[in-house]
Image (spheres, helix red, strand yellow):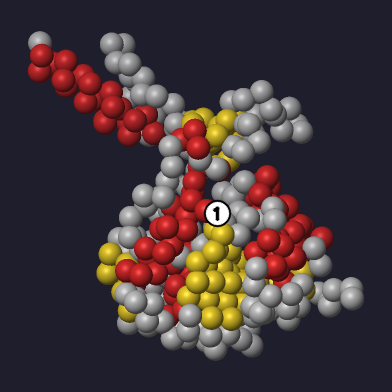
Amino acid sequence: MLALAYWQIAFCWLVLPELIMSDSVAAPADCEAPPARLRHMKDGRTFAFDASANAWRLVSEAASESGEPEVQLALPWSQFHAAFDGDFKIAGTPLNLGGDGSRRHQDQQQHGDTGSSIWDGAIALAKVLESNPWLVQGREVLELGAGRGLAGLSAALLGAKRTILTDLPYCLEALEEASNLTRPGGGYPGPVEIAALDWANPTHFLDSRPDFHFEVILAADVVWLIELVELLASALRALAVRRPAAEVLVVHQTRASSVEVAFLQAMDDQRFELVWELRGGSAEPVPALGVAWDKDFIPDSRINLWCFRLREAPDA
């Protein structure tokens, strides 16, 4: 009997969730359901993971304008696999990004604390930079929502003149660890800095660095919730105004088409123009520029890389 009880517990907690994901089996009547995976938002809303639909559904009282529950699609799999313990290299240097210990307790998280994860978009962007180092070489680079620093550290390894990796405070310790593990003692071609930058208040970051006139802004897979779209676009505007000719490289993985449409519209509203676009699912380079995905890291059609620039100089 004891062995049977142990088997039932193991089935409920380890095997059952995987089977439910494929809708192939019903739960035994004597199994207790595993606890719901919840994601709490800063605005008080709560989403629960619906395994049958592979989506996060709004379960708090708030609702979308249509009156239907809000849904954010989860990604069914990773396209690229790397442990980042020395197996992934940029310009011959292994990137060791440490662990994901920056994820906080669930009731303290902001938007799921996704900064502790490494997403396919960041991997694809890092390899694009490696294949086209002129995008960052000799230039001052700022990364927004750096997470564990894959894109920004890649830019630093490729010869950026100066690199600042930014994110919310809970990510900074992991960023410092990744920078030190990848190049102990900070042996990058140019200085690498770690700093907090809240999209809701970019002026605090800017006022503390009046001498930093970044030429490239990187944002790798950072906007996946509709509530973050306006914040990101307005923060990019505030940053780009410092140097209107700066290029903004955004790699985006579509989870909900409404978010992608809203982001492109928000960038247009903030007076950005789309200079060029590299679409996933194709090995074709950007015409006249030659920018292309790395042949071993071509993402599917869910991922696009966009280059934006301010459409006009800001008013004096």
Q: Is residue 44 above or below residue 207?
A: above
Left or right of residue 105, residue 29 in this image: left
Q: Nearer the viewer, residue 154 or 198?
A: 198
Q: Nearer the viewer, residue 27 or 87?
A: 87
Q: Quadrant of the N terminus?
A: top left
Q: Secondary structure at mark 1?
A: loop
Farthest front residue in view: 208
On the question of residue 247 being in view, the answer is no
The residue positioned 60% from the left and 59% from the top of the image is 197
Q: Residue 241 sits in which quadrant?
A: bottom right
Q: Residue 23 sits in which quadrant?
A: top left
The residue positioned 31% from the left and 11% from the top of the image is 29
> Where's residue 28, x and y in %?
29, 15
Q: Nearer the viewer, residue 308 or 145?
A: 145
Q: Nearer the viewer, residue 270 or 314?
A: 314
Q: Residue 284 sits in which quadrant?
A: bottom right
On the question of residue 147 being in view, the answer is yes
The local crowd at label 1, few if under 14, some if 14 to 19, many if 20 or more residues have their Cα within 10 Å, is: some
What is the total number of numbered labels drawn onto the structure image? Answer: 1
The residue positioned 38% from the left and 65% from the top of the image is 178
Left or right of residue 31, residue 152 in this image: right
> Where's residue 239, x and y in %?
70, 68
Q: Which residue is mark 1?
A: 168
> Where's residue 251, x and y in %?
57, 65
What amino acid is found at the position of numbered circle 1 in the picture?
Leu
Q: Is residue 248 above or below residue 162?
A: above
Left or right of residue 69, residue 175 in this image: left
Q: Is residue 259 above or below residue 12?
A: below
> Where's residue 63, x and y in %?
70, 29
The residue positioned 74% from the left and 75% from the top of the image is 242
Q: Quadrant of the C terminus?
A: bottom right
